[in-house]
Image (spheres, grey):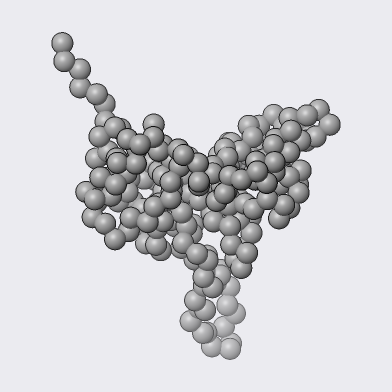
Amino acid sequence: MTRIHIVLPPYRQPRPPVALPDFVTDIRPPDPGPWPALARAADLAGLAGVIVPFDPQGPESLVTAAGLLRTTRHVEVSAGLRPWIATPQYTAKLSASLQRFSGGRLGWYFEDGNAETEQFVTTAEEFWQRPDGLPEVLSEHAFPLVLFADSASCIRLDLRALSLEAKVTAIEAHAQAGVSDFFLDVGDDPGEVYRLGEYVLPLLSFEREPNYVG
């Protein structure tokens, strides 16, 4: 099965709102930026997931993922992590809380599946499962789906400059080589994400129902 995830664009400071006269109380909420709209587009388009990249200069990825999980209903939201930015135990406990209210839709996304990363995941999973680890009310939920960008079954692609047909061709070529999870870079336009679900997914030959003769 082929799973398409979108990779959110880098965080940028939102544009300041139009200034109001001094005698007007400004109760407008801050500009949330493009991320919530992109996540909702992926949800409605039937894509598999949304990747919140790790950005040391941007918002905390797990906190951002929590917000996006609240604005979506079906799509998986994976937070980009780096080993030992926080302890595996703390990361597991925070993630278990998010799993509880999101229906198990949280994932972890790592750029490198090296030994340090694997040790981090192993330690977190052991803490999740052992009796003296997480509280029972949290540990009853599934451990987050773990995605490694450098895994043989995963690939990150920037296909934004290609036509819809060329996107399909590129995805099918990698799928035939054994790739199942595609992480596609996107811009700020939710329409771009809708088109992935509306036009690209139906054209993928390996996702169509087989035609049986006989």
Q: What is the total number of numbered labels drawn onto the structure image?
A: 0
Quarter of the view holding residue 208: top left
> What's the residue at 65%, 38% (across, down)?
100
Figure quadrant of the N terminus: top left
> What's the residue at 20%, 22% (across, down)?
211
Task: Give the side of residue 48 with respect to residue 29, left or right.
Answer: left
Q: Is residue 37 visible?
A: yes
The one of 21 and 11 positioned closer to us in this rendering:
11
Residue furthest to the top in view is: 214
Residue furthest to the left in view is: 214
The one of 78 and 177 positioned closer to us in this rendering:
177
Task: Give the side of residue 213 with respect to residue 173, left or right.
Answer: left
The one of 10 and 175 positioned closer to us in this rendering:
175
Figure quadrant of the C terminus: top left
> What's the residue at 60%, 66% (across, down)?
58
User: Looking at the picture, how far across and down is residue 32, in whole percent?
Assistant: 52, 65
Position of 214 relative to 49 (above/below): above
Quarter of the view holding residue 138: top right
Q: Is residue 94 visible?
A: no
Residue furthest to the right in view is: 132
Position of 208 relative to 68 (above/below): above
User: Looking at the picture, how far across and down is residue 46, in whole percent?
Assistant: 38, 41
User: Looking at the picture, how far across and down is residue 79, in whole percent?
Assistant: 58, 50
Position of 40 relative to 93 (above/below): below
Position of 158 relative to 32 (above/below): above
The one of 208 and 116 positioned closer to us in this rendering:
116
